[in-house]
Image (cartoon, grey):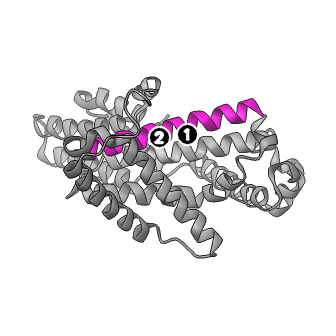
Amino acid sequence: MAFRPSLVCFRRGQLEDKKLEVIRIAISLFAEKGYNYTSVEEIAKESGMAKGSFYKYFQSKEDLLLQTVEIISNQIEKGITKIYSKQYPSDHEKLVDFISMTIETMLSNQVHLLMAMIFDPPLIKNKEIANNIERSKIKLNIWFKDFLLDLCSSKAEEYVWDLTSLLQGHMFQYFHMCRYYESGVEPKKLAEFLATVLDIVIEGLAERKPESVFTFELLNADMQFQSQSPRLKGQKIQHLLRDMEYTVKSLKIDLEEQEEYLKTIALLRDENNQKKSQTFLLKALINYLQEVPEIREDCESLKTLLDIK
């Protein structure tokens, strides 16, 4: 099968790449000069475009910051969903992948610089920005909690919020230290180290059983986000792909045709497992599989979970 990406997909990808580039430049300027002392004109100039071109991507400087928070949140959500749609040899490798993905997302979007200026008092007075940041922080906390709960439920379930706090605190402290000493961060190396530390902490908590600091009752603010859980989305993707394989194998069709559909499902799984999967290719593969009436409904569900229009 030969799948050809449309010109529209490429153009959309170029627009998204340019938007991310403008965001990275803007965050660097915010961290250097302060949000309130950085103008749209300066952001446009550093991005290599005219001031008017800035408004092709963002309505205002405030809109840029709001979209930054949403982009980071969406990227982490997609990363977690992808992790849960894969199978791992061990919980440790799954944890390393999760931490590595989070670190890479934060570094690529310069979250360590964003955090340095996000508490600027005049900035927080913008209620829309403050509310969006707060919602994103809550969602991120819940996603971390869900992930860790899934890994340590049999050993240290009562400490899951403490473990969430410890992991996030260690990550940001490393970001700040590396920035202070002008040292780079190797995401995989740091992820392996933090995952090992967390393994040791979980074992220690299970053995010594100290009193938890953050209880479920204290931080039970996640009900509104449960239906959006990337953990559940990832698991559903994995189950759908397995069900589709089972259904195709049971079809009374030509063996070559059956093999072609099974190879397409395998390609779909492999592409989804990529760190940066290509939406146009996922869509093309799913559209091909929709030729099979018995799995057409599963294909539609898969499109929804993968956010494919």
Identified by mark 2, the residue type is Asn
Distance, label 1 to label 2, CA atoms, is 6 Å
Which one is in front, 136 or 208? 208
What residue sits 36% from the left and 53% below the top? 271
What residue sits 52% from the left and 65% below the top? 174
Q: Say how many tags the image has.
A: 2
Residue range (magenta): 126-151
Which one is in front, 173 or 98? 173
Estimate the x, y position of residue 245 in percent, counting from the top left.
18, 41
The residue labelled by disc 1 is 137
The residue labelled by disc 2 is 141
| Residue 215, magenta (yes or no) | no
What residue sits 67% from the left and 50% below the top? 15
**Please, what secondary structure does the residue beneath circle 1 have?**
helix
Q: In which quarter of the view is residue 218 placed?
A: top left
Identified by mark 1, the residue type is Lys
**Please, what secondary structure does the residue beneath circle 2 have?**
helix
The crowding category of the residue bearing disc 1, from other C-alpha atoms within 10 Å (few below 14, some 14 to 19, many at least 20), is: some
Q: Looking at the image, is 279 positioned above or below residue 192?
A: above
Estimate the x, y position of residue 198 in percent, counting from the top left.
33, 57
Callout 1 touching callout 2 (CB < 8 Å): yes
Which one is in front, 254 or 242? 242
What residue sits 25% from the left and 44% below the top? 156
> Can residue 10 be seen by looking at this rendering?
yes
Estimate the x, y position of residue 46 in percent, counting from the top left.
82, 63
Q: In which quarter of the view is residue 126 placed?
A: top right
